[in-house]
Image (tube, rainbow, N blue to C red):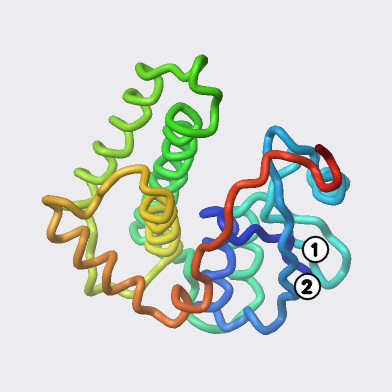
């Protein structure tokens, strides 16, 4: 299988961390692709009409996107404990946390647009602050809704990778005054799957060969 990836994407990292936790990472050929709303990547658009990574090309040539769908597909390929639980109570808790993680990452990207990526003259502080409030509220929720004792699931992976991007980009100091979240995050970041998939690289907003 081939995974179109980006080394500084929280969504792509979620897929690769999940693959490591499932024990299927060695079945993936990981290929880095730069994508940006400002720079069309034709190789990615040829597979995903949204022009985004991650994209998975399965062994039989099926093209699968986005990160949530890819993770569910990969979870069907192994015989170990499933990261998307079958028990309804555990399943919907995991999917709820995955949804929170997606919201954190989406809001964080919006905050970054309004603080450094958009030209300064057209940045809109109220939009930045509104998106930041979503991250703050989500982190406050997580402070009292994380369970470090249970087996990890897709929600945990999604949260850890989204928060790692928030930390990587300096969007919000979420560990301050949240001892439970900080402890959970520190412990999760020590897992081999996280150590093998560290975020790195800068956003590239120009297409290859452009000036």
- The residue that appears at 58% across and 69% down in the rendered structure is 16
Looking at the rendered structure, the secondary structure element under dot 1 is strand
Is disc 2 in contact with disc 1, using a CB cutoff of under 8 Å?
A: yes
Which residue is the site of mark 1?
A: 57
Crowd around label 2: few <14 · some 14–19 · many ≥20 (10 Å): some
Apparent side of residue 144 relative to residue 96 in the rendered image (left or right): left
**Residue reaching furthest front?**
211
Which residue is nearer to you in this view: 122 or 79? Answer: 122
Apparent side of residue 141 relative to residue 195 in the rendered image (left or right): left
The image shows residue 32 at horizontal and vertical percentages of 71, 62
Which residue is the site of mark 2?
A: 1
Compared to 82, does 200 lie above or below?
above
Which residue is nearer to you in this view: 71 or 25? Answer: 25
Which residue is nearer to you in this view: 189 or 76? Answer: 189
Looking at the rendered structure, the secondary structure element under dot 2 is loop
Crowd around label 1: few <14 · some 14–19 · many ≥20 (10 Å): some
């Amino acid at each position: 299988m081939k995974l179109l990836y980006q080394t500084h994407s929280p969504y792509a990292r979620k897929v690769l961390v999940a693959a490591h936790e499932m024990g299927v990472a060695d079945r993936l050929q990981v290929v880095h692709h730069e994508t940006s709303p400002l720079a069309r990547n034709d190789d990615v658009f040829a597979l995903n009409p949204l022009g985004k990574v991650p994209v998975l090309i399965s062994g039989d040539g099926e093209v699968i996107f986005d990160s949530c769908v890819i993770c569910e597909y990969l979870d069907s390929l192994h015989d170990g404990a499933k990261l998307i639980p079958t028990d309804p109570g555990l399943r919907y808790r995991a999917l709820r946390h995955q949804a929170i993680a997606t919201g954190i990452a989406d809001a964080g990207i919006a905050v970054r647009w309004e603080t450094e990526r958009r030209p300064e003259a057209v940045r809109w502080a109220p939009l930045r602050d509104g998106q930041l409030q979503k991250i703050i509220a989500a982190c406050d929720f997580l402070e009292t809704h994380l369970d470090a004792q249970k087996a990890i699931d897709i929600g945990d992976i999604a949260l850890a990778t989204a928060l790692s991007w928030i930390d990587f980009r300096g969007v919000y100091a979420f560990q301050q005054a949240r001892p439970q979240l900080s402890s959970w995050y520190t412990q999760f970041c020590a897992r081999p799957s996280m150590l093998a998939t560290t975020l790195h690289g800068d956003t590239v907003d120009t297409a290859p060969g452009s000036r």
